[in-house]
Every structure is written in C-alpha cells, then in structure tokens.
Amino acid sequence: MNNPAIPISKDKKEESTFKFILSELKPKGKFFTPFNIISIPVILLGVVLIVIRFINGIGAVTNLTQEVPWGLWIGFDVVTGVAFAGGAYVLTFMVYILNMHKYHSIVRVTVLNGFLAYVFYAGALLLDLGRPWNVVNPIIGNSFGTSSVLFLVAWHFLLYMIAQLIEFSPAVAEWLGAKRARKILSGMTIAAVIFGITLSTLHQSGLGALYLMAKDKIHPLWYSEFIPILFFVSSIFAGLSMVIFEGSISHKVFSKQISKKNHWAQKGIVIGLAKICAGAMFAYFFLQLLVFIHGKRWDLLNTPMGYWYLIEMVGFVLLPMMLFVYGYKKNSIFTVKFAAILTMLGIILNRLNVTVIGFRWDAAVSYIPSWMEIVVTLTVIFTEIWIFRWVINRMPVLSDSPEWVKDEK
Amino acid sequence: MGLNRRDFFRTAGVAGITLLALDTLGAEKEKDSDVEFRGILYDSTLCVGCQTCETICAETNGLPAPIGELKPGVLRKTDENHRTVVNCYKTTKGELFIKTQCMHCNEPACAAACLTQAMCKTKEGPVTWNGDKCMGCRYCMVSCPFDVPKFEYHSSNPKIQKCTMCYDKIIKGGIPACAENCPAEAIKFGTRRELITEARKRIVEGKDVYVDEIYGEHTAGGTGFLYLSSVPFNELGLNTKLQNESYPELSKGFLFSVPSVFVLLPPLLLGIYEATKKKKNDKTEENE
Ligand code: SF4
Ligand code: SF4
C-alpha cells in the first residue's frame, strides 16, 4: 500500500494477454456432468422462447394479464433474486467496514455472486420490458421520471453493478497478472464498498417501495407502509442464507481450489453467519409482528390467506430462526444449513406473496405463471451458474491470490 | 489502502447527482398546480347506454369496434383495444348505465410511477402516454388504482393504451370525441372547476334524483373525470374504497428519505471503518 509503485514489465505481457484470454475461454474439466446435462437443454429451450417473446410479444410466452402486469419474471427473478444477492453488501460491510477478518476468505466469491446476480436478474428485467429499446431513456437523461421509485431502483442497480465490479476487479487483475492495475483497483475498494452499501440499503428497500402505490391490490396481510423496511431487513438474512447455502455447495464442487486453511475456517464462518442471521430474523419477526398488530388484522387470520400468512411467518421465519440459534449453540453445521434453506424458501414465499400471490389475489382471472416463464427463469439461473463456474475455475476467487500479490505488500 | 479524500468526494459527488435529480421533482409540481385542469363530467342519470362514445372513441383512435353485448350483469372491461366501455348494472333504482375509462387523476399514480415520464399529466389536465419514451415496464399498470393502462401483450412493438381525453383535439381548442357525440348529453367537457360547480348545481336542483356526492371530487386525490349518479357509486361498480389522498403520496415518504440516507450513511460507514481499522493496525494482515 505505501510502497512505491512497482514498474510494470510491459515486455511479453501485452501480446500474450490476448492469447491467454483466448485459451481461457475454452471449457475446463469434464463436460458430461449432471449439471451440464440438465442445464444445456433448458438453456437452449429458453433461448428459443426468448426469441419467440421478442417476435410475438410478451403475451406469447407469459400468462400475464391486464390486472397482473408483473409476474414471475419480476416477482421472482428480480425482486427475489436481488434479495438473495444482498449477501454481498452485508459481507463487504462486515469485512471492510467492521474489519471482521474472519470472513475475508468468502468475500470475493460473495461479491462475484452478487455481481452476477445483478447482471442476470436485473438483465431479466430487459426480457420483461415491452419496449426495451427505450431502456436508456431514464439513464441518458432526456426523460428523468424522478418521482418514480422504479427510476431510483434502476439507477441503483446500474451504479451498484459498477461498484461491485470495482470490488471484484482485483481478482480479474490477478488472473491477468496485471500488477499495476490491481494496485489501482484495489485502492478503490473501500470507496466502492461504502458507495455499494448505501446503494444497497436504498434499493433493497426500494424494491419493496415499488409496491407502495399498489395499496388496494395487495392482500392487506402483506401490504403495509413498512414494506420497504421489511424488505431491507429481510435482505440481510436472505443474502447471508444464500452465502451459507452457496458456500456449502462451492466447498464440495470446487474443493480442489480451496486451501486447507480456508477449508477449516469455513465452519467458524458458517456458525458466525448463523448468529447474524438469527439476530436479523429476530428483528424482522418482531417488525412483522408490530406491523400486524398495528394494522389490526386479526380478523384476516381466520381465512385461507390468513393460514398462508401464518405458514410463512411461523414455518419460514420463526422456525428457521430457532434452528439458527440451535445450530450455533450446538455448533451443528447441518442444522445451520437446513435453517438456511428454510430461510431461503421463506424469502421466496414472502417476495412472491407480495408480488404475485397476494397481488390481486381477488382478481377474477388469477395469474399462474406459464411453463415458458419458468423455463426462461431457469435459463437465467443456469446461465448465471455457467458464468460463475467459468470465473471460479480461472480467477483467484475461492483459491488464494497468486504469490506476487503477497510479495507486493 | 485507506479511503483518501478524493475517493470520498467522488462518492459524495455521485450522491449529489441523485439529490439534484430528486429536487427537480418539487419544482415541477408547483408550476403545474396553478394551471386550470380540464375535465369531464359524466352524468350517469342521463346516459341511455347507446354506446356511441365507445364507437366514436374507437374510430377516433383507430382501434377495433366495440365488442360484447351490453347486458345487465355482464361486466365488460376496457382493454388494449377498447379505451372506454359502458356497462349496465342492476341497482336499487333499476338498470343503470355507466361509462368507464381513465380518470385523469389530479396527481396520477401512473405518472408518478413512470420512470421515463412517458405517462404524463399535461398542464391542460389530460394524462397522456408517449411511445417514444415508454420502455414498457408496466409499472404504471401496477400503480394505477383504477387499473386503467392496458398493455398490448401480443405485439412486438407494444403500446400502453388508455384514454387520453382526446388531448390532440383539446390543445387545438376542440373537445373530446365522446363529449362531442353523446346524443344524451351525458358527457360534458370543461374546466374541472366549472364542472364541479355544475355538478353541485345539478345535485341541488335534483335533490331526489342524485346522491349527494361527486365521485372523483376527492377520490384518489381528485380526478379529472367526475361522476354523478342516482344510486351509491358502488352499485355502479365504482371502487368506493379508494383513499382520498393521492396515490403518489404513498411512496413520497420513501423517496424523501433517499437524500438523507445518501448524506448520512457514507460518512457513518467511513467513521466505523476508521474506528475499526485503528484496532487492527498492529496486525500485519492487510485487508484488500
Ligand atoms: S386513472 Fe390511472 S391511468 Fe388514469 S390518470 Fe389516474 S392513475 Fe393514471
Ligand atoms: S410502461 Fe411505459 S408509461 Fe408505463 S410506467 Fe413503464 S415506461 Fe412509463
């Protein structure tokens, strides 16, 4: 950091970088893995559906109606996907702002995950736009709809992606062996982190605020003026549960890349995250309870939607919260992982309840996503995993940074 | 690698841009509010259910002719091909007709929702849609409490369809096609203020005909389209549960908190960062 800039060796590097990237584009490892066998046909089918969507209109592949104009692509891909990507801002906060070094080994992979999630899930938004060629309008400034929450969210998505890219860029530099660039880029990390956390706070809650004007359309058990706060608080444990879940898979699939030291650290990390999840979930549950009592909604409980609400609150908030507590008290990784999965299901439930299931729950023709919408959603997820895997296998994300990084310090 | 001064200002600068953008919102509103809005007064007691308005609307806007039979108990809805429909309801005073279309709210949720200003409350009163700006996100549809904007789901170049109060005619001094052609004179065009006075007069003069209320005077913060009726409005299928505050009001609190978060949070984070870094100083490990 304080050492004088090291002159970069411009010699062979330049011309070989291109060749290097070309060679890296080729897939690595076995081709016929179960994941590939499932994902390739789905992706191909998804691409066909996307082409049909652009030729014949959104109605050709989706079941959206005039009453329910936002369905699975927004409610799941964007709203839920971004909640899961919340792990990146929570972890960067812990590691860079609070200097909790214990979690340092998983920061890169989480930021990568977050970045790709934004690229793909926010990218899924483009599929849902009827007139995507006008998508630049709110960005280049000829028509700023500044009173729109969606305007805010769109800008924040864009800026946050840039912030995350900066946070992740040292890994790219290490992969390319660009020493000088790495130094500059990693010097920008803290600024990017602070900016990123601020943006995340606002757009995680902003996703909830999108629905504030739909007051008469969302089932009263899920609508309150506090949706933004609820969305924000739940994004903390949604993101961390995703980190736990994704970490446990990565540690199996990419175990060769992970150093012994980090393998051992993983257990401590998972237990630590469980503690934070439990805390955030407690706050969330308490908030939900306050909102419920404040709204005087007792009479609604004894209806089918009321039972559904109770299932969400008890089965997918209270229960996983207690499991997290049990998990870290008893040091049981298994319990924590199970709790993380329950929590994630709970988040999916919650976001869909606000955006799809509880949205015009009383409409004459209710919206049920078509199989094509589901295939396109899977296409988005699978493609993201492909890219994720491609990056992990090449850049020092899970694996340690190359030697020269340490030498530099 | 600390956060140096330059980095901090860079962060603050981008935050500032967002603040500026938000500021323009307040300025615009004031300018608009002292222009007189035009509106339409629809007197359902005069409507005979001839559907002339439906036909003429379709003709004027180059849309397909009305479909479906106008029958009591059958609810026809506006859609991407029909900007207005007339329905017949069985009410406590017999079978009555009612026309529905965009309400041209004083503070429209659709325009507040629109991130491109494609939906826009013109200073003349009509709420219009601009295809060069719209990106088809359908957030206006999500937000409109009357479910008015409709989307062409089966087109590769889809438009948002809704009544524009014949804005093109109005700015040339004309009046909306439906108001011009209604044989029963149930549809009256004018400034909103005149229309409210007129509606009040009719209510006073026809005490035993009208219910003592103008639908749209306060609903959803006031609308440009106003209804008179001889039965409670919910019997005619109008939503009487809507709030009287405008809908954009609901997300204002959130939007107004944005600048303060941008001003307060980064320095706070920076402070925590500096505080926790000091503790770590003796450690050799670097954070990157
Ligand atoms: S009725 Fe709906 S579409 Fe019409 S102005 Fe009001 S909010 Fe906009
Ligand atoms: S669909 Fe078009 S008019 Fe409606 S909110 Fe989106 S950009 Fe605005």
Image (cartoon, helix red, strand yellow):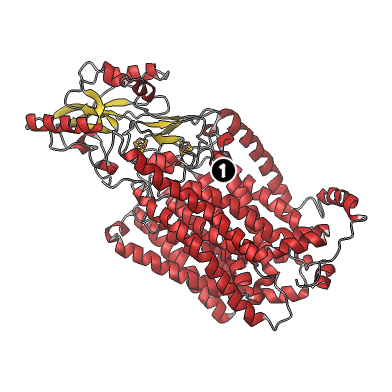
Above or below: residue A27 compared with residue B56? below
Above or below: residue B182 compared with residue A168? above
Question: Tag 1: residue type?
Answer: Ile
Asked which secondary structure carries label 1, the reply is helix
The answer to whether residue A75 is visible is no
Along the line of sight, the residue nearer the viewer: B101 or B199? B199
Residue at 88% over, 49% down: A19
Number of other residues with Cα within 10 Å of mark 1, as a class: few under 14, some 14 to 19, many 20 or more: some
Q: Return the residue at label 1.
A: A139
Q: Position of residue A305 (x, y in %)?
A: 36, 54
The part of the image, by quadrant, that contains residue B44 is top left
The part of the image, by quadrant, that contains residue A168 is bottom right
Q: Position of residue B112 (x, y in %)?
A: 41, 43
Residue at 62% over, 66% down: A92
The answer to whether residue A63 is visible is yes
Above or below: residue B113 compared with residue B196? below
Along the line of sight, the residue nearer the viewer: A38 or B95? B95
What's the chain of the residue with tag 1? A
Q: Quadrant of the C terminus of chain A?
A: bottom right
Q: Quadrant of the N terminus of chain A?
A: bottom right
Along the line of sight, the residue nearer the viewer: A24 or A374? A24
User: Seen in the image, is A171 located left or right of residue A343?
Assistant: right
User: Seen in the image, is A80 located left or right of residue B5?
Assistant: left
CB at mark 1 closer than 8 A to ligand 2?
A: no
Q: Quadrant of ligand 1?
A: top left
Identify the residue at the far right of this view: A12
User: Seen in the image, is A153 located left or right of residue B238?
Assistant: right
Q: Position of residue A339 (x, y in %)?
A: 54, 68
